[in-house]
Amino acid sequence: MRHLVWFRTDLRVADNPALYEAAADGAEVEAVYIDCPGQWRCHGNSSIQRDFMSRNLQVLNEQLAQLGIPLTVLTVDTFAEVPAVLASWLTTHTFDALYANRELGIDERRRDKAVQQTLLVPCRVYNGDCVVDHGSLTTRSGDMYKVFTPFAKSWLASLRASGYRLLPVPEALGEPLSCEPLSLSGERVSSEAWSAGEAAAAQRLTQFCRLSLRDYGELRDFPAEDGTSSLSPYLALGILSPNQCLAAIEAELEQLPFSRGEPGFVWLNELIWREFYRHLLVAFPRLSMERAFKPETEALQWSQDDEGFRAWREGQTGYPIVDAAMRCLKQTGWMHNRLRMIVASFLTKDLHIDWRRGEAWFMSRLIDGELAANNGGWQWAAGTGADAAPYFRVFNPTTQGERFDADGDFIRRWLPELAEVPTRVIHAPHDWLDNHVPGHGYPKPIVDHKRARLHAIAMFDALKDREAV
Ligand SMILES: Cc1cc2nc3c(=O)[nH]c(=O)nc-3n(C[C@H](O)[C@H](O)[C@H](O)COP(=O)(O)OP(=O)(O)OC[C@H]3O[C@@H](n4cnc5c(N)ncnc54)[C@H](O)[C@@H]3O)c2cc1C
């Protein structure tokens, strides 16, 4: 028997159900990755993520070679061409079955359906990206949860009842192979700040659990601290699996935390948010189609303020915490979660710009860009999503800065023009700059937050009025 494993966003050999099952019955195994540069562009993914993907693919290539499994990279432009190229590859190389782990976006699901309809051999698809499989958690009426807390309760009950399954790396299937270096073509921005490969991810995970897991609840909101795991680039491309995260928590704490207040629970809860958004993406295909989760919010009258969007994108809004966050994103391809919430709120509630523009900008810059979490985060902040922030609770960018970057350390790191500003005025530095630094160039706030907040609330109130008519 000859089995072909099709790698996608699951670039790992450990805890990889498709690879494990393909190799389980002593079959000959080969692997393929199908690069679709046109699709990459169409989905608006970033050049830094493409570079990270390419580097991780090379590490995977080496690991598979050690297991005696050759990896081939095929290139087509878009998903539309994938069924034909796979069918031809399977036939020419006489494979008996195709193995893959599921991907969740609507384009990926349509592609996979087309592949299944085209192939003459069995196509076996597994859940490799969630601890609890999509669709398996439902309310009493059989629907997907629309609110996080009951979803989390159900998720934890499932984990308690069934545990999680951590699959080993398959046994080597033959002598190690030599392998040629491979790399993806197209525009790339260096991702060298992030070590590639699952060993690097595992090391980061272990270190995080050892040093920060217990204090995560206290530290996670402060962007100047190293208080979160920074594992998102690895989870987004499947270099690391959520089961491996659970295993690391368990190894550190000797047991899994099942309730609020137990050490490690706050971090586990973030992993449950990750799964919540993934389950939502499967249950509500409109989330993959640039539609709001709450259909009534499609009528919101967003502003076409291109100048405001440019200022936000470039970190020139005159709100230091927003600007520092946006410049950090531009320079590194990553942003702390607290800052993602602040800048998303600023774009949608202070500038009244459509969340879809922010979502696309994030996708085009993030090294961890990932449809489910990005869409979930944006719709949460905009007030259009499942279990979103209440529309009348608008983040104040100045007090957020004061609370979460009290000494201004993060702001000074990313806004060199504010390097000399004293801490007492770092979150509203304009008068001080005007008096002490001639020609400083830092912009005045581009909106008045109080007025902008009232406008945002009025936008949502107008929706209620429409419903009442
Ligand atoms: C507007 C907005 C956009 C976002 N876009 C993305 C994105 O494109 N890709 C992405 O992976 N995350 C996204 N997030 C979620 C979150 O900000 C990042 O996952 C987190 O900052 C990554 O840092 P970390 O690995 O140190 O996370 P930790 O705090 O260490 O959390 C561990 C893991 O849990 C998951 N996670 C944590 N918080 C969330 C969350 N709120 N929602 C879903 N999953 C979460 C991530 O996989 C993360 O790596 C977004 C959040 C917002 C508000």
Image (tube, rainbow, N blue to C red):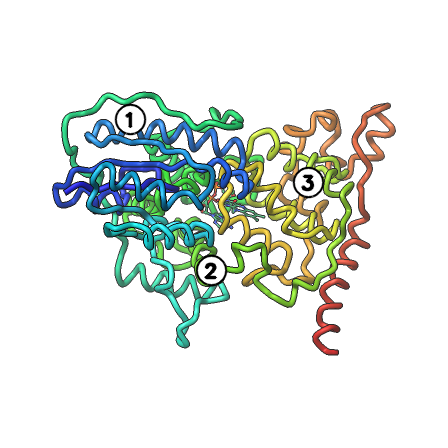
Calculate the distance from the C-alpha at mark 3 to the C-alpha at mark 2: 29 Å
For mark 2, what is the residue? 280
Q: Nearer the viewer, residue 395 or 201?
A: 201
Q: Amino acid at mark 3?
A: Val
Q: Quadrant of residue 94?
A: top left
258 vs 321, left or right, is left
At a point 77% along the width and 39% down the height, the residue shown is: 428
Decide: is 466 above or below 220: below
Q: Earlier in the sequence, mark 1 or mark 2?
A: 1
431 vs 334, left or right, is right
63 vs 450, left or right, is left
Q: Which mark is residue 62?
A: 1
Q: Which mark is residue 393?
A: none
Decide: is 460 above or below 351: below
Q: CB under 8 Å between callouts 1 and 3? A: no
Q: Nearer the viewer, residue 292 or 345?
A: 292
For mark 3, what is the residue? 322
Q: Identify the image quadrant of the C terminus.
A: bottom right
At a point 27% along the width and 56% down the height, the residue shown is: 163
Calculate the distance from the C-alpha at mark 1 to the C-alpha at mark 3: 41 Å
Q: Earlier in the sequence, mark 1 or mark 3?
A: 1
Q: Nearer the viewer, mark 3 or mark 2?
A: 2
Q: Identify the image quadrant of the N terminus.
A: top left
Calculate the distance from the C-alpha at mark 1 to the C-alpha at mark 2: 35 Å
Mark 1 Cα within 10 Å, few/some/many (few <14, many 20+)?
many
Decide: is 345 above or below 461: above
At a point 56% along the width and 51% down the height, the residue shown is: 377
Q: Quadrant of residue 296?
A: bottom right
